[in-house]
Image (cartoon, rainbow, N blue to C red):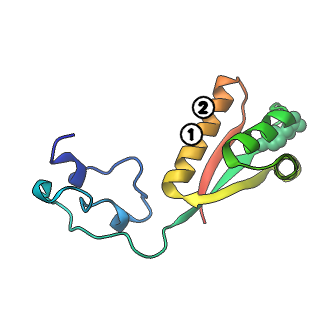
Amino acid sequence: MDRFSSASATRMQDDPDDPGRRDGGENLPERQTGLLLKPRPKTGKPNMYKVLLLNDDYTPMEFVVHILERFFNKNRQEATDIMLHVHRRGVGVCGIFTFEVAETKVAQVMDFARANEQPLQCMMEKE
Ligand code: TYC
C-alpha cells in the first residue's frame, strides 16, 4: 500500500456511523505520517451492532443450528433456542459485536448459506 492511501481512503471496515473512529494513521510508523486526518487514538465505547438471522420457509432447521454453532460459538441448546425463536418470530439476534466483527459474521453466514444453496438471510443493525 502506498503512503497516501491509508490516511485518505474510507476503508470497508471503518464504521460509517462513527467517521471519527477511522484509522487516521495513528498506527503508521513516524516517518510515514503524511497525514490527511489528525491522529486520534480510539478511546471510549465503540458502536455495537446486532447480527440478525431472518426466517424463511426453506432453510432446514439443522442448517441454522449449525450456523449458530459454527460462527457464533453457541452450544447445541443455545443454537436450537435461537433458531426456534427466529422460526416462530421471524427474526432473532445471534450476537452483538463491533462493526468490523459484525460485518465479518454477516459475510461468513451469507457465504456459507450461498455455498450450500440455502436462502438464509443474515443482516446487521446498529444497537
Ligand atoms: N423456517 C425454517 C423451517 O421451517 C427454519 C428456519 C429457522 C429458517 C431460522 C431460517 O433463520 C431461520 N425449515
Quarter of the picture holding the N terminus: top left
* Residue extending furthest toward the bottom: 44
x, y percent for residue 18: 41, 65
Circle 1 crowding by C-alpha within 10 Å: few under 14, some 14–19, many from 20: some
Q: Residue at x 70, y 24 (%)?
A: 116
Q: Is residue 16 above or below residue 113?
A: below
Give the camera-side residue of 89 and 70. 70
Q: Is residue 42 left or right of residue 82?
A: left
Quarter holding ligand 1: top right
Residue 26: image quadrant is bottom left
Amino acid beneath label 1: Ala
Give the camera-side residue of 46 and 32. 32
Q: Residue at x 34, y 48 (%)?
A: 11
| Label of residue 111 in the image | 2
Q: Is residue 41 left or right of residue 58?
A: left
x, y percent for residue 16: 42, 58
Disc 2 and disc 1 in contact, CB within 8 angstroms? yes
Q: Residue at x 68, y 31 (%)?
A: 113
x, y percent for residue 56: 80, 38
Query: Which secondary structure lies at badge 2?
Result: helix
Residue 112 visible in the current orientation: yes
Q: Is residue 108 left or right of residue 25?
A: right
x, y percent for residue 90: 81, 50
Residue located beneath label 1 in the image: 107
Query: Which secondary structure lies at badge 1?
Result: helix
Q: Residue at x 78, y 37 (%)?
A: 66
